[in-house]
Image (spheres, grey):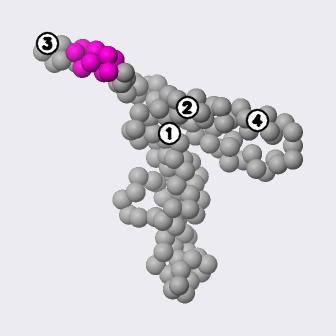
Amino acid sequence: MKARIKKKLAKKQAQSQGTQPAQPKSAVQPLAQFAAECWRIQKLLPEFDGNKKALLLKSSVEKMIAMLAEADIEIDDPEGVDYRDGMTVKVTLFEESFNVPSGKTIIAETLEPGIYVGGRLASQAKVIVTVGKGSVK
């Protein structure tokens, strides 16, 4: 009984302070999937440069991503970042490259972005990591 009262009080305090409790788990996954699809469309748009309709689509996708940001949903694309053990990404492939200095590991490609809802990880990024085998620079 006391736990239920404490929970109600915490919820009222969060609402009065302008902070909302995290979305129920059932609502988070569809939002995370929607955010990932917006990111995917945004990544594909440069392939359609020169197409007037692509400009309209780009504008719409930017608006959707801005609305997600207003709802405290963040899309994190780690592509190009140095990879370190312990990062909150799912590595689907480690590939060696002589174009990258030996000992350096870089997230070469993001297959799916990380999605944060209310500052909490809702969906891990899926990435390909390049392991350097080239001469040390």
As drawn, the label of residue 68 is 2
Question: The disc labelled 1 sits on which kind of residue?
Answer: Glu
Secondary element under disc 4, as helix, strand or loop, is: helix
Secondary element under disc 3, as helix, strand or loop, is: loop
As drawn, the label of residue 133 is none
**Image height of 2 relative to 32, above or below:** above
- What whole-number distance in Å separates the C-alpha atoms at marks 1 and 4? 20 Å
Q: Sequence order check: which comes first, mark 1 or mark 2?
A: 2
Report which residue position mark 3 lands on.
Answer: 1
Are the residues tagged 3 and 1 within 8 Å (C-beta)?
no
Tell me which corner region of the image, top left, top right, bottom left or bottom right, holds residue 18. top left
Question: The disc labelled 4 sits on which kind of residue?
Answer: Leu
Prevalent SS, magenta region? helix
Q: Which residues are magenta?
A: 8-17
Report which residue position mark 4 lands on.
Answer: 57
- What whole-number distance in Å separates the C-alpha atoms at marks 1 and 2? 7 Å
- What whole-number distance in Å separates the C-alpha atoms at marks 4 and 3? 52 Å
Are the residues tagged 1 and 2 within 8 Å (C-beta)?
yes
Whether residue 99 is visible to the viewer of this picture, yes or no, is: yes
Residue at 51% x, 73% y is 131
| Mark 3 Cα shell of 10 Å, populated few (<14), some (14-19), many (≥20) | few
